[in-house]
Image (cartoon, grey):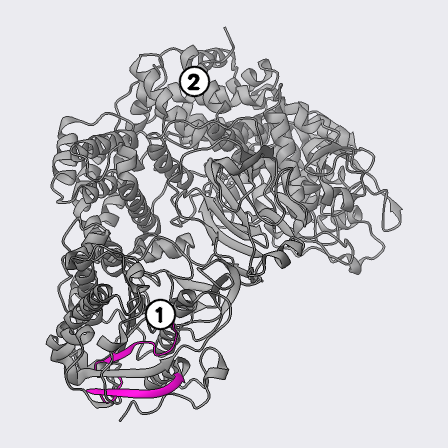
Amino acid sequence: MRPGISFLILAVAAEQLSCGVSLGQESGISGQAIYAKQCASCHGKQGDGTKSHPQPLAGERSVAQLTRLIQETMPEGQPGTLSGEEAKAVSAYVFDAYYSASAREKNAPPRIDLVRLTVPQFRNAVADIVAGFKGNVGWSTERGLKGEYFKSRNYRKEDLVLERVDPVIDFDWGTEPPGMGIDAKQFGVRHKGSIRPTVTGEYQFIVRTEHATRLFVNDTRTPLIDAWVKSGSDTEYTGSLFLVGGRIYPIRLEMSKAKQGVDDSNKKEQKAKPAAPAMLHLEWIPPKGTRQTVPDRCLSIHGSPEQLVISTPFPPDDRSLGWERGSSISKGWYQSVTQATLEAATWVGEHADDLAGTKADAGDRKKKLGNFCKQFAERAWRRPLEPVEEKFLIDTVFGMQADAQTGVQRVVLATLQSPAFLYQGAGKAESQSAVAERLAWTLWDSIPDQDLAKACAENRLKTEEQIRKQAERMLADPKGQAKLMGFFRHWLKLDQGADLSKDLKKFPGFDAGLVSSLRESLELQVQKVVFGPKADFRQLFSEETVLVDDRMAAFYGTALPAPSGFHAAFLNSGQRGGILTHPYLLAHLAYNEETSPIHRGVFIAKSLLGVGMKPPEAVAPIAPDLHPSLTTRERVLLQTQPSACTSCHAIVNPLGFALEGYDAVGRPRATDRGKPITTAGDYLARDGKTHTFSGPKELSNFLGQSPEAHDAFIKHLFHHLVQQPERAFGKTVPEDLRAVFQADQFDIRKLAITIASCTAAVNRDVAVKGPVEKGKAP
Amino acid sequence: MTHSSPAYNRRELMARLGVGAALLPFVTNLPGVSRAVDGGGAVQRKRRLVVIFTPNGIVPKDFWPDAEGPLDKLKACLDPLTPFKDQLLTLHGVCDKVRGDGDAHMRGMGCLLTGVELFPGNVQGGSDTPAGWAKGHSIDQEIKNHLQGNAATRTRFGSLEFGVMVPERADTWTRMVYTGANKPVAPVDSPYQMFNKLYGQGKDRAAVVSVLDGVAKDLKTLTNKLGTEDRRLLEEHAELVREMEKEIKDQQAQEGKKVGHPVPQLEPGVRVDNDQMPKLSKMQMDLMVASMLADFARVFTFQYTNSVGMARMRWLGITEGHHELSHEPDSNTTAMDKLVKINNWFSGQIAYLLKRLKDTPEPGGPGTMLDNTQIVWTNELGKGSSHTLDDIPFVLMGGGLDWKMGRALKYKKVPHNRLLMALAHGFGDEVKTFGNASYCSGGPLTGLKG
């Protein structure tokens, strides 16, 4: 049997193994006594802080790390007065009593909270309720759009002369025809397929052509851009719309070339004239992005049904714990929900006949719309309706309206405003459908699809194996990919790059376009690993090549292996160790002109190694020109010399220093201010061992292998997926997952599947009513 | 050059369809609506403009009064307007002089309210060179911008564009209103769409209120199932529901006072369909009068079909399309009779509007609504069979601009730009030129004030 398929089993095993660390007793020195005498006045009797030192004693450091910290910085004002043994004893006591996660859990056990849908979950769920009426859409491997070329300006079937797949729409035909058998003076081109944007937000589409054009995105009837009447000399047309990332929308681009603004009364003269030039470009500006040709990776040649897009703006979800969760509500949120449900009701009302498979004048229209309402509510609530609910929704809310369309709209409003829609698993009896729902929130940020519903109906979501199998399918689905990539976007700060800019005198060419290429490059690089054959976490830190496009190639001075798109290349003769040395992260974690070992070190410590740190003292960084002879490394050491700083900077600085061999835009460098760069760094690990590394590759290698990095990664991923505290599912969940991750060869996808299937199996009905009781899982 | 998609920006479209809820703040911050009465000082009386368009030219001999001067008996085309004879001013001799690309129907429509040429383009008419959209904004939008620029005359919409049976096709023949060069505005020809635009927010509010009781009940049921830690969230939620309900009800009460008239009831299920034209026309007229009462806008356009309009007025016993009939020569008296009947029917529709306005006292002001409304009835052609842009039928009605009514005026081929300028000046918008400046010499058309 696979290790750790159920938390329950492992929890028992791990509890048996745990031997209760109590270093203090071994040496005969009482850590508790030292604490009471020397520490409690500031840190509080229960480690919960005092007025002067409100920060509670809580964190992720090990006893060894704490010991060093205490020795070097405590007690305040007189560090070093405790003997090594005393420091060890007091840190062991603090660790067990207040500081460690398990101590904290003992003191206030985390629980599975009732949560509302997050904003992405709301948007996805509403869209998927509707999508459920139209059938599933996959994302095939054929990139680009299907191009149809006609020899007339209209799209008459008999005039179709050429069909082909165009990866991108980026054509300058000039006065030439776009293909054989087409007259350059008059032709029509139509591109069809689907588009899948990666992130959620406002997309501006741009079509460039000298001729008549029309662009349909999502809405297949009303064009987003309508320049079908060619008028004047405009050659550029724009239209914006809000799209939810990771979803698939139909797209159609039409272009028609004809004689324009010419007096054609003299046919002979016309014939002699050369054709006017023609181009056709489809570009976009994604949210926070820069203008670019719509890339082929976002296009598919297959059609898809129109989606219901909720474009109502929402206040952001709570992120106070570092991950999004629906733990609080506010007036702003409720107003947005109201507006969004109205938006949905309007859309569904307009499309009701189509969705319900009926027509305005059909005799059984009312019956079909009533059935549609019932299905809509059951999908929205993720469960069958109780008879009394059905009676209310269908007989009263729907049935009492004079006009059936208004009735549908009222049902949509009532359904989506209900807590049965807005809260995860709210009040739902424990069942296979509850498991299905949890899988869907975890892996899709959405509701279960038809496949899951069918599995429940056929009693096929019962065993661990069955649940896991569904989770595997779901992660491979475009929605699963979108959610997992969303995690990496957050983890690697790809969602923060909009403000990234550099001193253009020092780094000419580091413009918004380059930044967007860098961001995309890192995202694609991660995607390559995560959805590659092994999905090995360590691979994230070992890849020596970087995905490079033309902009990056030009800036970093590397030959581009192929003309367009991203290609793996050795950037500046290698010296890269995966994501950590990707120029996006290196540049993002740096100042305008100078590097910042502190930013880089904090990122490694916090995000990659999971070291908890208190916010820094408010100190302005020392300006480089105050000490023009100092290297960045020397300047940082000078700055962080005070003992108040060392508790964190003793960890942060040596990590960041290992990356000093890259400048503020991520280019390798050998010297800083004329002095050779030292890239030596070290890290005192939880096991008490000091790891030293010289340079980025050794650091990357350490990170790929470090159990602390694994723990941190698991924790971040868990929170992103499940949006509940890890330990609410069992005291030993982190240890269990680490063991599984290791046994699975650090396969990221398998980890996500394990997290999803194990948490989905935990009975929330129990959890919702009170603290989790172990042993009640199904 | 860059411009947004002319007719169909999705957001605009949604706003137009009255999906205001999705875009406009739902409860708070209604769009800055300032009522005309702004406290101190002399309050100017409310004045409105209505431009009504009917297509395909007219039958001159059965339309124009024979002599200049006080109106006597009206000809057959205008006969239904007889009860409002003293509120009528016919302007003969006003010509659309704008030339350039596009056939006469295209220019007749695209230059009618803009007074400026069309861009070269790809819309190919029956003759002449193909063309695109007009190169400038239309006079109704000019006046709207002027009124919206002043807090005392600002209204929720500024202008409303009504249509009756306008084909679902955006081209030079179907658009006469432009917010700017290459920016035509589509008229709303579904009364239901227009209703949503006007009253959608109120409808949305009513819909929300109707489901809140159920929501509150569901919240209570669920709360009882939960442990104390989780109840807090749902209790907060229930409180927000109560607040929302109260706010909406307060707002409804306030709006009831502001609108000052009951929301019109539309007959449900009337299809936008040729044979329903009489019904649609009346529904749209009623909505227009209602929006005047509510002071939703001061500028209105009302477009029947389109340039080259194809209405088949079977309810008059006419089975041919309007446009094909209009091509018949004067010698075809059967066709001429039918054309007279068609124009007579249009007059009847306008008479209905005039009657509604005359029967309605101006809210908060002197006289009737007709006394404060300037109506302009016009057409893209002078005469269908010749496609002339001379002697464009301009019939002015109502007292909105205090012009001297009850007369027939004859001009000697004056460019219609000058009439457009006179309209702007009438609203205090003293434009120096409008459209193509070379047709504006002489300034606003004179003789209107008597």
Residue A319: in magenta span: no
Q: Secondary structure at mark 1?
A: loop
Residue at the image point whose x is 29% and y is 56% from the top: B18
Residue at the image point whose x is 58% and y is 43% from the top: A294
What number of labels is visible?
2
Chain name for mark 1: B
* B210, A270: nearer the viewer: A270
Residue at the image point whose x is 77% and y is 37% from the top: A560
Q: Position of residue A579 (x, y in %)?
A: 68, 34
Q: Position of residue A169 (x, y in %)?
A: 60, 42
Q: Nearer the viewer, mark 1 or mark 2?
A: 1
* Amino acid type at image mark 1: Glu
* Label disc, if present, on residue B380 of the rendered structure: 1
Horizontally, residue A617 falls left or right of residue A345, namely right
Q: Position of residue A651 (x, y in %)?
A: 68, 37
* A771, A130: nearer the viewer: A130
* A142, A310: nearer the viewer: A142
- Circle 2 is placed at which residue position? A470
The segment highlighted magenta reads B388-414
